[in-house]
Amino acid sequence: MLRFECDYGEGAHPRILQKLVETNLEQTPGYGLDPYCESAAARIRSLCGTPDADVHFLVGGTQTNTTVIAAILRPWQGAIATSEGHIAVHETGAIEASGHKVLTLPSHDAKMDAAELRAHCTAHFADDSSEHTVQPGLIYISHPTESGTLYSLAELKAIRAVCSEFHLPLFIDGARLAYGLAAEGTDVTLTDIAHLSDVFYIGGTKVGALFGEAVVITNDALKKDFRYMIKQRGGMLAKGRLLGIQFDTLLKDNLYFQLGEHADQLAMKIRGSCLGKGLSLYVDSPTNQQFVVFPDKLLEKLEKDFSFSFIAKPDSTHTVVRICTSWATTESSVQTLCSAISNL
Amino acid sequence: MLRFECDYGEGAHPRILQKLVETNLEQTPGYGLDPYCESAAARIRSLCGTPDADVHFLVGGTQTNTTVIAAILRPWQGAIATSEGHIAVHETGAIEASGHKVLTLPSHDAKMDAAELRAHCTAHFADDSSEHTVQPGLIYISHPTESGTLYSLAELKAIRAVCSEFHLPLFIDGARLAYGLAAEGTDVTLTDIAHLSDVFYIGGTKVGALFGEAVVITNDALKKDFRYMIKQRGGMLAKGRLLGIQFDTLLKDNLYFQLGEHADQLAMKIRGSCLGKGLSLYVDSPTNQQFVVFPDKLLEKLEKDFSFSFIAKPDSTHTVVRICTSWATTESSVQTLCSAISNL
Amino acid sequence: MLRFECDYGEGAHPRILQKLVETNLEQTPGYGLDPYCESAAARIRSLCGTPDADVHFLVGGTQTNTTVIAAILRPWQGAIATSEGHIAVHETGAIEASGHKVLTLPSHDAKMDAAELRAHCTAHFADDSSEHTVQPGLIYISHPTESGTLYSLAELKAIRAVCSEFHLPLFIDGARLAYGLAAEGTDVTLTDIAHLSDVFYIGGTKVGALFGEAVVITNDALKKDFRYMIKQRGGMLAKGRLLGIQFDTLLKDNLYFQLGEHADQLAMKIRGSCLGKGLSLYVDSPTNQQFVVFPDKLLEKLEKDFSFSFIAKPDSTHTVVRICTSWATTESSVQTLCSAISNL
Amino acid sequence: MLRFECDYGEGAHPRILQKLVETNLEQTPGYGLDPYCESAAARIRSLCGTPDADVHFLVGGTQTNTTVIAAILRPWQGAIATSEGHIAVHETGAIEASGHKVLTLPSHDAKMDAAELRAHCTAHFADDSSEHTVQPGLIYISHPTESGTLYSLAELKAIRAVCSEFHLPLFIDGARLAYGLAAEGTDVTLTDIAHLSDVFYIGGTKVGALFGEAVVITNDALKKDFRYMIKQRGGMLAKGRLLGIQFDTLLKDNLYFQLGEHADQLAMKIRGSCLGKGLSLYVDSPTNQQFVVFPDKLLEKLEKDFSFSFIAKPDSTHTVVRICTSWATTESSVQTLCSAISNL
């Protein structure tokens, strides 16, 4: 059985494990105040072109989303996301558990439309009984999105403009950032992400780390006291250096970006096989997640040897599944899958 | 500089790293539904003598405390702890952030007194305007406590009796459990802990794991839907197997208990040196944390080569520090410290 | 200017004020433990045919919704409402502030469809990764709805059946209950509401009281400790008897139901005038709230003498407004409005 | 039975009821946006000498405390109060339910000591691992306190100085403010309260209103969006004018202050009787709440005709009760009580 169901099925890139082994018996201060975290933070500031950014390392994505969002919002504010946003759907109400509504806008292949965002904000702040509804407090988008799609630079700038107009911070969930930056045809770079957002994160869990998300805060107003928030929300790892070591390794010698490119190229091969076979795409994604519509009979055959994630049942005879590649996916396993698809 | 300030200054026991390396490229399902978690859970059920217990693996202590407590309590209930309880003092209000007050009882070297607990509960439930105050909803104790002290079996049973009388779950924080179970003279075993509590955890972070706490729920009423709670509170690690692998390794061949014994024996050597030098103990702890009162002048000298945690300043010329050993502390570094103390 | 914008524009029914004056200098225990609250609760139990129900009096609707919902749900659960549900839209995220997501289903003139509810619950509990999404924990509906519409008895029973199937409590918001029970053609009675729900409330604020909502809990499992919750959420009025006196007066001699009938009859006259004039209804409501589509030019004229609530702008030349009657609306003011509409 | 157990046993001052009757059928906008609220707010600004203050009317004390505190604090901050502070003890954990810890300092007859406050804040902000503990976010004191005691102007200024030093807002709970301002010997005026605090409230519930607390926000930084918070926390009364009418009446012609004086003078008579009888005071209070130690045998006799609140049982033969006067207490009932005490 070859697993293509997600991008977190294996451990970590070998260089990371090697570094963990090498440093294992060193003694360092806890809670992220060690030299490895410092070094990783310095690399991130440099790569982002944001010398004054604050960088913090958290363990997982849901934790990161909740911690960042709850740190920013005032009690009567909500986070605006699309109706497919990870925080709106797949975090068991973590944002609500912190006291805040997720306000949803329509999803366009999981992307937010700047004009719809402007319309929502305009309507709220123009309403003379606005205090009866949740006030927009920040904008949350994912890049790549939950459907693997990407914003163009123009689209990001349009969203940024609305944020600026209404003084709303922009928070970009980069859980799969490497796969977005490496996609063919994208015009969005890491420095764009860093400069257009107020806070974003560089995902490690799904891109070669054992775990870990690096939060980058560029907006000065959001920097103060963030460590209190990490501690309170359970994200302050006692052995914080494990995060520093991982990001320091990932961001050295372009490894992070190469892992993204590797996965995207393999995903494009799978996409090609599917299209070649006449299968249709549920969403057209240029990144490591492919959403493919299969006739149920073909899928049944394929699932004897490969595992995918179930996404939807668009009609009684078809099923949509997600096929993921990752930093760990091998050429040969993709070749095996592509052959199997072609031979269906 | 030799560090004795905490028990989480190094990485993980080498057997754990080795196992992580060996399994690194295996593909497993995520979120704790893998064979390693299953195996570790089975070991724990067996060691505890609780074949029906639910076992869950979380990342860190604050997260575990909040997740368990918030899962148990109803909104108008609080957790009873001592005034030195970790949840009362050192978690940045994580319990309160989940909506619940920490109700504090006096600390007796960080231990709770069963009679005082009974008096508090009796008074609350006898008050005919009890709805104006927070209702006790569970009892939280640590074993070893935050001061390294231990409950005797009789003391634990007395607390258990109060819990049963008032139908209040008992939650035991076992962040340093190994160091408690291995202490000389203790009459409390792992099966006692498992049978006297409704839920407890076996700490990994401070006993040889990179990170991780194993929650054991023995009370059927508390089992339902706990995975929702882990996910919502950010504790469901995508690569959950990392936790399974670590606990599976720690609990194999008695490693966990041996690490506890190792650290306790070294702590007793340090304790002996301090007493031999005429220093007094702030708390008399039989476990890996020693709380020692130093004249400031002696401490200054010692701190040129060794680091400790500052605890208190009992008067203008003395300081209390915490000296920790751990699974990773070596005989030779303890010897160096003991010599330095003797030669002060 | 005659105000038809809402049903809470005046004070209280004169009998209530008279009773408040008569009892003003009596001394009673506080916090709802007085004889007036007892008497009102007894009337409610009797009128509902639920001799064992617990009855509590709270001050306002948002407070009541939050208190009831937060008392019922566990942290990982949400309340299911329609997308127009008051809790989903008009309470500034009060439910989320208590930690819970409002899960929305489509609105059919503000009503929930039992089949869609069943489909949602079935899908959630059948999902083998259900712990990643919010668990349905209770069903919230309003009767009358936010659009003035009413469930038929068959529709209520169908929703009740889904609730029973999935062991989910049904909470009915009766902020305007009198206007629903008195509507022409309804086959739903107060005893139906009481027997089909697990908890509901009889609204006072919008039906002749100065303020006040009477919560009726019929499900034994939801009764325990509810007074703690009222106190914690700020709903326990020190002079609780003010609520008892008001409901005791409203529910004596059928006053409450007569006020409902009065308002509904006047609303039907307004409806008739609008239809007679060829205006269309945005929603066809049999109760005291009428939602009418006006050409902007006609509306401008009318708004010189009458005030309504703005609801929507369906196109560039039309506006939807809400026209409300209430217990306090007079025949003559309705006559004035109807003439004005006819003469437009 | 004459009731002296609390200061909210009767309805409202007759002038308030009269005004409610007079205005009953007027139509006004809801939610506090009516002319009566405007007028009452203008009176308050004028009486306080704070022309730019924001004034909001809420229903009850617990609600007001929670709404103000939760509006001010960031998630990692707590409110500092004394260990007897109402928010620390008698609100069923309402502050914690909003996510914030109540940090307690020693109570000196329910008063906070400025030096202890400074020491706490200094220690917190000097700690280099301060993020592991709750950050002080505001200071909460009551005037009069829960024990009826009063701060001197010098004491208030000392607390204010600490607040300013650490940039912490000062919130004064004035639930019984009238009884404090009218006390013999106090040197604290309403304008002092308004100028030394960042936000405070003028209590109505316990001083002649049916209900209601008037929140006065003088610190510009705390004004924004407060109406959202009132709505979300259930404190925005639909018929908000009821609050405006009550405060407009109370604050006209010095009624509020006269009611305070009336109650204080009667309380001093009771105090005199108790001292004359040789009874001791549990706390020496110059306001309407008297805390008296009775031998149990004498108390038993007295409680046949009078009701008090139980406070404590200092030993096996004595009991402390609270004896309250209020705006509604009559000379004759106090005379009856004083005679009964003298004749014990």
Image (spheres, coloured by chain):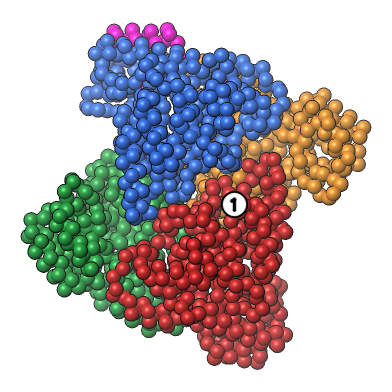
Chain colours: A red, B green, C orange, D blue
Q: Position of residue A332 (x, y in %)?
A: 54, 91
Q: Secondary structure at mark 1?
A: strand
Q: Nearer the viewer, residue B335 or C109?
A: B335
Name the chain letter of the residue that bears numbered label 1.
A
Q: Nearer the viewer, residue B339 or B216?
A: B339
Any part of residue C86 in sight: no
Neighbor class of circle 1 (other Cα within 10 Å; few <14, some 14-19, many 20+) is many
Q: Position of residue A184 (x, y in %)?
A: 64, 80
Magenta residues span D322-343
D301 to the left or right of B54:
left
Seen at 58% across and 56% down, the residue is: A169
Q: Residue B212 in magenta?
A: no
> To which residue does mark 1 refer?
A137
B299, above or below A281, in the image: above
Seen at 45% across and 25% down, the residue is: D192
Q: Nearer the viewer, residue C344 or B305?
A: B305
Seen at 85% across and 38% down, the residue is: C299
Q: Amino acid at mark 1?
A: Gly
Q: Quadrant of the N terminus of chain B?
A: bottom left
